[in-house]
Image (tube, rainbow, N blue to C red):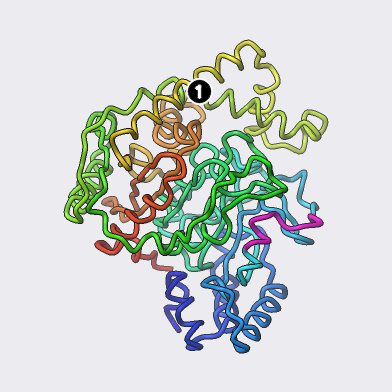
Amino acid sequence: MADLHFLDLVTLATLIRRREISPIEATRLQLDRIAALDGKLLSYAAVTTERAMAEARVAEAEIAADRMRGPLHGIPVAVKDLFWTKDVPTAAGMSIHKSFRPAEDATVVRRLREAGAVLLGKLQMTEGAYSDHHPDITPPRNPWNAGYWPGISSSGPGAALAAGLCFGALASDTGGSIRWPSAANGVTGLKPTWGRISRHGVFELATSLDHVGPMARSVADIAVLLTAVAGADAADPTALQDPVPDFAAGTAQDIHDLRIGIDRNWNRVDVEAPVRSVLAETERVLQGLGARLVDVNVPDVTQAVADWAPICAVEAAVAHKATFPAHRAEYGPVLASVLEAGHVVSGVFYQELLLRRMAFRGRMRALFNGIDLLLAPVHPFAPLSLETVGTMGLQPRLIARLQAYTAPFDMTGQPALTLPGGFSTDGLPIAFQLVAPELGETTLLRAGVAFQQATDWHRRHPKL
């Protein structure tokens, strides 16, 4: 019981199914841990204590009556604060929305409830899911070291999972916002194929770039969460109609047939030694598991990374048209500047952006004609201190380097899985990512499970 908070989700599900622990006990222990630790970590925007305990009691009664809904039944989870949650404040990290209480759940929140999950609360995030927290919000702390970056914009989910304050979370990724906090906090995160998960009831940043995805402590946990929330949705016509497999069942195979592409140049030039070391060890593990490593040349991402910012700005300006610029004073300076930039992009220039994006997407799709997955860094440097992050606005090249391995796959909509792969000399987590062609989540998760069965990086936790 003392180590319950660091169990992976699937192990807790087994204990609940065997009646070795009850949903009420698991939820109470989580709420007590949140109360004890989150005053310093600040990962939660709101903790729904009474509602969580009520949901736990319902789950316990159903399980006792042999009405088991599945592996999420009775599992305490949380969601990033941009998912509508009925009658619960849902601010998306914004002062202007701090009193907003949705009249309905987002589709993904409803699907979690239908699966029997217990919702602990809403996790903190940057303002509007862009790159900086609103000035009124104290950012979450990295549980490994409070002097280091917890990632953006899903900073709360990353910190809460690493600290053992929930067993799974839903988040979003527009330019790297699942992958950066997963890497920074030493947890596992999936940015699925664009449209694989409904965005109904999710605050927008940039519609064509926004991806909803799960974060957890293992790939096996990710598979369970993805199976529960993915799929078509009549309320979101952009959600893909493709059938949703049992992703957990698909991870049981070995990876002897997988071809994993590696661009030696892209993975090494301008990539710092600690990250290169993690990638080299990851190659060794994957090859030892039977995967075949294939040399590839990733299309030049420089223009796509540069184009991401104006595309995001235009789409964000549309998303905020009801409140910006009319209520500009309630916005923080970073998001406000992005929205202002979006308002002045010309139609001709925007069309040029779209055409370049289409061409880049085509080149990236072609890359996967000869491989099943691509191995890449999440970002090219060792974990970032808050001091370094604080100067990022004055270092455009540092921002471009940060986005170089994440934003391209938001531009293409291809799925990417982030996994812990080692540590820096300062004891901070370092991650890598595997990327698949569109709708390649089953293959991604299969490779991720195989890697985590052969390693224990994901089982290491901060001392709190």
Q: Is residue 67 left or right of residue 331?
A: left
Frontmost residue, 253 versus 387: 253
Quarter containing the C terminus = bottom left
Amino acid type of the residue tagged 1 in the rendering:
Arg
Q: Which residues are magenta?
A: 101-111
Q: Nearer the viewer, residue 113 or 76?
A: 113
Residue 116, compared with residue 425, is above or below; it is below
Residue 266 in picture, x, y percent from top left: 28, 30
Q: Is residue 322 above or below residue 179?
A: above
Local secondary structure at mark 1: helix
Q: Residues within 10 Å of mark 1 (few under 14, many from 20)?
A: many
Q: Is residue 15 left or right of residue 169?
A: left
Q: Position of residue 175 (x, y in %)?
A: 51, 37
x and y percentages locating residue 340 in the rendered image: 69, 24
Q: Is residue 416 above or below residue 244?
A: above
**Residue projecting furthest to the top:** 348
Question: Image quadrant of residue 331?
Answer: top right
| Residue under label 1 | 357
